[in-house]
Amino acid sequence: MAEHDHALGALPEIRPMLATEGPMPGEGFELDWGFEVNWEGARTIAYCPGDGSVRLVSRGGDEVTGTYPELVGLGEQHGRRQAVLDGEIVVLDERGRPDFEMLRRRMGVEDSGEVARLMMDAPVRFMLFDVMYLDGRPLLTTQYRERRMHLAGLGLEGSHWSTPDWIEGDARQAWTTGMHHGYEGVVAKRSSSTYQPGVRSPDWIKAKHVETHDVIIGGWVEGSGDRRGLPGEVLVGVDCPDGLRFVGSVGSDLGDAERGELGEYLGAIARDDSPFAGPIDIPDAQWVEPRLVAEVAISGWTADGLLRRPTWRRLRPDVHR
């Protein structure tokens, strides 16, 4: 954190605290934790200097205020109070769930005309979950529970921003509520934890809801670098009445040894044309007979019917198409 004079418009620069991935706190320990939705979005720090403006900075340190003009009103609502706020920018689907693919269309766009068009197609919402500085007072050493109380007291609710509720001491309720609403997972935060800028801390634990599905391999794309000649990603589908429907590509968590073994299998069942129903526009795709079944883990499905954040689990030689 860089210290500055805390005059109007001058605020400390604060890097976001990060969570570790792991299981939820076990029974008997959960009373010491608070639980929030794991929003599938763009981590963002908001600087409200107290003059009615707001400056938005991405996790990587880039200013993104111009990318999300619908959030300008946050500074106006905050008024003369100074604050540094933490949260996640999301795009919600028709069921109120974060849609990362829709958000991706907004990220990095700076052209004002394109931004204006995207605001209509994919409006964003800023989910606020922490406050690290308020009215001249740094809150970094203040406990999470108290920071949450300060944040709730600001009453920051608007057409494009909100302060979602959190659950204290009840991991099961947080987990089942998140599952019911189709959220990516839960973030558990130790109630007594301080805010540690830039640190990936065990005081914050990200636990993901994961679905596993069997998919059919219909092609692959060669990897790059040391993986040249091996599958970088496999192209997968599911059986539908009109044929094999393409649902995306999977390469994450596929180990090098598995890539080599899988490459031999795929080479033995190569074919010239795509086995998927409908056209698939993937440069340099290599097609195979749709015989191999793989198990993948996903965080859900996109509005277009594609796998959301798929990761490789295993080949299923025990399952035949």
Image: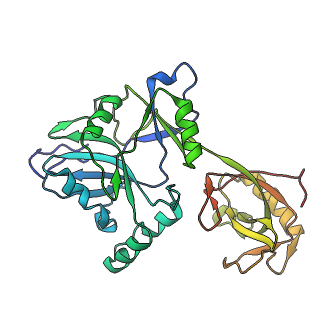
Q: Position of residue 158 (x, y in %)?
A: 30, 55
Q: Image quadrant of residue 273?
A: bottom right
Q: Nearer the viewer, residue 213 or 174?
A: 174
Q: Quadrant of the N terminus?
A: top left
Identify the residue shown where x is 21% and y is 54%.
Answer: 77
Q: Nearer the viewer, residue 150 or 142?
A: 150
Q: Position of residue 78 (x, y in %)?
A: 20, 50
Q: Image quadrant of residue 76?
A: bottom left
Q: Nearer the viewer, residue 222 or 38?
A: 38
| 218 displayed left or right of 209 | right
Q: Look at the image and tell me whether residue 45 can be seen.
A: yes
Q: Is residue 106 above or below residue 53?
A: below
Identify the residue shown where x is 68% and y is 64%.
Answer: 249
Identify the residue shown where x is 58% and y is 22%.
Answer: 27
Q: Quadrant of the C terminus?
A: bottom right
| 283 displayed left or right of 65 | right
Identify the residue shown where x is 89% and y is 69%.
Answer: 269
Q: Is residue 74 above or below residue 194?
A: below
Q: Look at the image and tell me whether residue 220 can be seen.
A: no
Q: Position of residue 111 (x, y in %)?
A: 34, 77
Count of labels shown? 0
How did the renderer colour the structure? rainbow
- Outermost residue on the left side: it is 7
| 48 displayed left or right of 57 | left
| 197 displayed left or right of 21 | left
